[in-house]
Image (cartoon, helix red, strand yellow):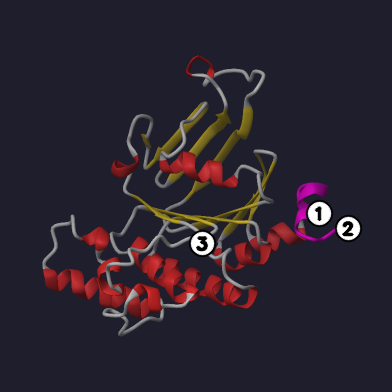
């Protein structure tokens, strides 16, 4: 299958090197417990759940930042076991945009393009197009410290999209912003992902944000994936009381 396949993935913390795969033991915390998920090319899937439910651990496992205790991460039919982070061709965006303060906006966005075989004109055209897409046209020469929090996250999104990653992983990218700005930016993130045809996994604890961004939403709790469905379907037919409770449908 093309796209991302997560097959029976578990992530455990505190395991010794000899007990990473297999059953649990004293002192071992299971962050992700036998999760399977598919993300089709061009699809945006949100992982939704409370703090500590395992959604960020699952994202980091897909990125290659956390070792798998069990299972497989597959992309376009290739098992990524042993493939290092920098060779997976995945983009990453975090809560703090982690922009380079010594680079202006344009050079931040161009960072991932500098190792590609592009002419200067091609890099500049890509930067200009992405800044226009995220609502920051003409910001190329602006200094990063002069930007607002929302503007910095727009720059971070443009930078993540610039190298055309085959999968973009976004870990709570809007959670540091106030609610009104977060809701507005969620819609803008959705537009940017759809316009660029980017396959993405978006982690959040906010169900309004998840519904605004994603084609499908996966609800997680205690390391398990409870339900995956389109936002409307999720609210109309929650698969369990826990899903309904988290979505605010039941007290």
Query: What residue is shown at x 63% (from left), y 59% (from top)?
Result: 230
Distance between mark 1 and mark 2 Cα atoms: 6 Å
- Number of residues whose C-alpha sits closer than 10 Å to that of mark 3, classed few (under 14), some (14–19) or many (20 or more): many
Q: Quadrant of the N terminus?
A: top left
Residue 241 on the magenta span: yes
Residue 47 on the magenta span: no
Distance between mark 3 and mark 1 Cα atoms: 24 Å
Q: Quadrant of the C terminus?
A: bottom right
- Number of residues whose C-alpha sits closer than 10 Å to that of mark 2, classed few (under 14), some (14–19) or many (20 or more): few
Q: Earlier in the sequence, mark 2 or mark 3?
A: 3
Whether residues under marks 1 and 2 lie with C-beta atoms below 8 angstroms apart, the answer is yes
Query: What residue is shown at x 75% (from left), y 59% (from top)?
Result: 247
Q: Which residue is mark 2?
A: 251
Q: Which residues are magenta?
A: 238-251
Q: Which residue is mark 3?
A: 173
Q: Which residue is mark 1?
A: 245
Q: Earlier in the sequence, mark 3 or mark 1?
A: 3
The reply, left or right, for residue 34 in relation to residue 157 is: right
């Amino acid at each position: 299958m093309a796209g991302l396949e997560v097959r029976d993935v578990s992530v455990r913390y505190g395991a010794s090197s000899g007990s990473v795969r297999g059953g649990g033991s004293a002192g071992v915390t299971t962050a992700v417990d036998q999760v399977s998920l598919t993300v089709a090319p061009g699809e945006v899937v949100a992982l939704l759940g409370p703090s500590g439910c395992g959604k960020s651990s699952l994202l980091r496992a897909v990125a290659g930042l956390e070792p798998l205790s069990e299972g497989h991460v597959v992309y376009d039919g290739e098992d990524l076991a042993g493939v290092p982070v920098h060779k997976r061709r995945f983009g990453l965006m975090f809560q703090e945009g982690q922009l380079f303060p010594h680079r202006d906006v344009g050079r931040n966005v161009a960072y991932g393009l500098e190792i590609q075989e592009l002419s200067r004109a091609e890099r500049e055209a890509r930067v200009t197009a992405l800044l226009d897409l995220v609502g920051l046209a003409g910001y190329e020469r602006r200094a990063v410290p002069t930007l607002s929090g929302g503007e910095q996250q727009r720059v971070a999104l443009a930078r993540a999209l610039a190298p055309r990653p085959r999968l973009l992983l976004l870990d709570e990218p809007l959670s540091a912003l106030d609610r009104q700005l977060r809701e507005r930016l969620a819609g803008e993130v959705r537009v940017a992902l759809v316009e660029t045809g980017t396959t993405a996994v978006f982690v959040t604890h906010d169900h309004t944000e998840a519904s605004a961004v994603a084609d499908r939403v996966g609800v997680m709790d205690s390391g398990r994936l409870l339900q995956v469905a389109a936002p409307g379907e999720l609210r109309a037919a929650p698969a369990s009381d826990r899903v309904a409770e988290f979505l605010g449908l039941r007290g």
